[in-house]
Amino acid sequence: MATRSIVTSQPEIACEVCGRRLLRGEQPDVFLSSGQRRMVCELCVPRAANEGWQRESEEGFSSTALPRARKRSSIWRR
């Protein structure tokens, strides 16, 4: 009987702050620092923010606020 090798299709991702490899199912937060994307684990998010790194998802939204849409009243109030 031949042995099987287990192959995972998930790429290995390491935290840019602490160097820890993320486990399967963990999602890294993406930060920008000096124009480069940095993958950060959940535990190191406060450290990355303290270093002045900006979240990629917040890029462009910090300086200009988007106007809020007016909330429509319900059909019963019209």
Image (spheres, grey):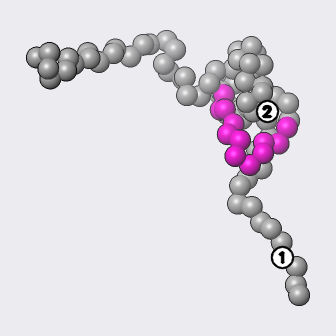
Residue 18 percent location from the top left of the image: 85, 30
Q: Residue at x 55, y 28 (%)?
A: 57
73 lies left or right of 46 = left
Q: Residue at x 64, y 21 (%)?
A: 54
Give the x, y percent position of residue 10: 71, 55
Amino acid tagged 2: Glu
Q: Is residue 5 magenta?
A: no
- Left-right relation of 29 to 78: right
Mark closest to the chain's N terminus, 1 or 2: 1
Placement of 38 over or under 12, stated as above or below: above
Residue 15, x across and y down, in percent: 79, 35
Measure how far apart labels 1 and 2 are at the Cα level.
33 Å
**Quarter placement of the C terminus:** top left
User: Where does label 2 land, which residue?
Assistant: 16
Report the side of 2 relative to 48 (left or right): right
- The amino acid type found where label 1 is placed reads Arg
> In front here: 24 or 11?
24
Circle 1 sits in a helix, a strand or a loop, which is it?
A: loop
Q: Point out the residue furthest to the front here.
A: 76
Name the secondary structure under disc 2: loop
Quadrant in the picture for residue 47:
top right
Most common SS among magenta residues: loop
- Which residues fall within the magenta stretch? 20-31
Is 16 placed above or below 55 here?
below
